[in-house]
Image (tube, helix red, strand yellow):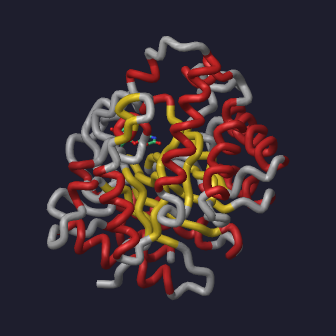
Amino acid sequence: PTFLKVKANKLPNPFFVGMAVKANQLDSGSKYDAILKNEFSSISAEYEMKMNPISTASGVYNWAAADKIVAYGNANGINVHGHALVWHVAVPSWLTNFSGTDAEFTAEVKKYITDVVTHYAGKVKSWDVVNEAVDDNSVNLRNTVFLQRMGPNYIKDCFKWARDAANAAGDKNLLLFYNDYATSTNIPKQNKMFSIIDDLKASNLIDGVGFQMHNTYLSPTKTQIETDINRAVAKGLKIHVSELDIQVNPANDISSFTNERRLAQKEKYKEIVKIYNALPAANKYALTVWGFKDNESWIPYSTDLNHTGNDWPLLYDSNFALKSAHTGFLEGL
Ligand code: XIL
């Protein structure tokens, strides 16, 4: 078979093909390990590089799983994308329930960002500094503990602390990303995201935008995706399609994976890869798929997504067999 990264590497303007991983998949000799080394040139941690698993108490860190992921990438010539320093869903309870003042809370966040960026300086190529900061139903910032405790400048502060930590550690090339979802279809949200990005860009604090792309076989349309991404291209930013998966059963109207949906999914994967591949070289970075096997995807029955049924959103089936989605990805390259 043709492997994804092999084909992507031969393009006139190549880019990384990424996979979301968990530390326990990386033991050598595992099927995940073999597929990773053959097919993928970048990794993101699906869970273990978020604040909740790393920060067990103020100034106390559990690096084990995150270190394993980063070391795996470094040892195997695989790019490592850091995901994510600040995300409202992955706040450790000690910080959620922090009883100190707002200034002390802010100091804890600054210390966390500084310590993590320093720990991985030179080992992680890029970080999602802030993830999902825009509200879904308004043009406001999401009402998170970070907004409540630190005020509306918290996003800029977090990027500044990340940049300062990288520079102090001698890593002048760390790429800082803002990452969010559903910005191609939710235009008020898209506009708000780009106002945040403009503000960061004006202070030279941002290098790229992560578009999660937890898409469905119907949505967003090609034009919607292109319009969204092109706004970031026009600002000279790198583009990361950061968490790609394509649901085929968002309305829970099928009980098994039908041929019709299989082909629709294949076409959607192809469409997105083609959109990405057509970007100018300077704007390319990575296109990352959010998990290996359908049966291990976060999508089926996800309460975050109000997904009420089973689904088959990824490139490999539950037996690691290549799906038509994988063929679609290859055809887009
Ligand atoms: C999800 C992971 O897939 C799950 O395994 C984990 O339990 C929760 O997080 N947006 C993001 C990702 O930025 O970090 C989320 O990943 C999916 C939604």
- Left or right, 214 with respect to 194, comes to left
Q: Position of residue 323 (x, y in %)?
A: 28, 66
For the residue pair 236 and 214, the one nearer the viewer reads as 236
Would residue 260 be seen by someone viewing this image from the given angle? no
- Left or right, 36 with respect to 178, comes to left
- Left or right, 72 with respect to 209, comes to left
In the image, what residue occupies the spot 62% across and 48% down? 162
Q: Position of residue 257 (x, y in %)?
A: 24, 51
Q: Position of residue 135 (x, y in %)?
A: 61, 26
Number of on-image labels: 0
User: Against 144, is 247 above or below?
Assistant: below
Q: Quadrant of residue 14?
A: bottom right
In the image, what residue occupies the spot 70% across and 44% down? 160
Q: Quadrant of the N terminus?
A: bottom left
Q: Position of residue 117 (x, y in %)?
A: 53, 51
For the residue pair 121 and 179, the one nearer the viewer reads as 121
The residue lying furthest to the right in this view is 202
User: Against 271, is 86 above or below?
Assistant: above
In the image, what residue occupies the spot 31% across and 76% down? 37
Ligand 1 shown in quarter: top left
User: Against 310, is 18 above or below?
Assistant: below
Would residue 36 be seen by someone viewing this image from the given angle? yes
In the image, what residue occupies the spot 34% across and 84% down? 2
User: Against 281, is 231 above or below?
Assistant: above
For the residue pair 176 and 310, the one nearer the viewer reads as 176
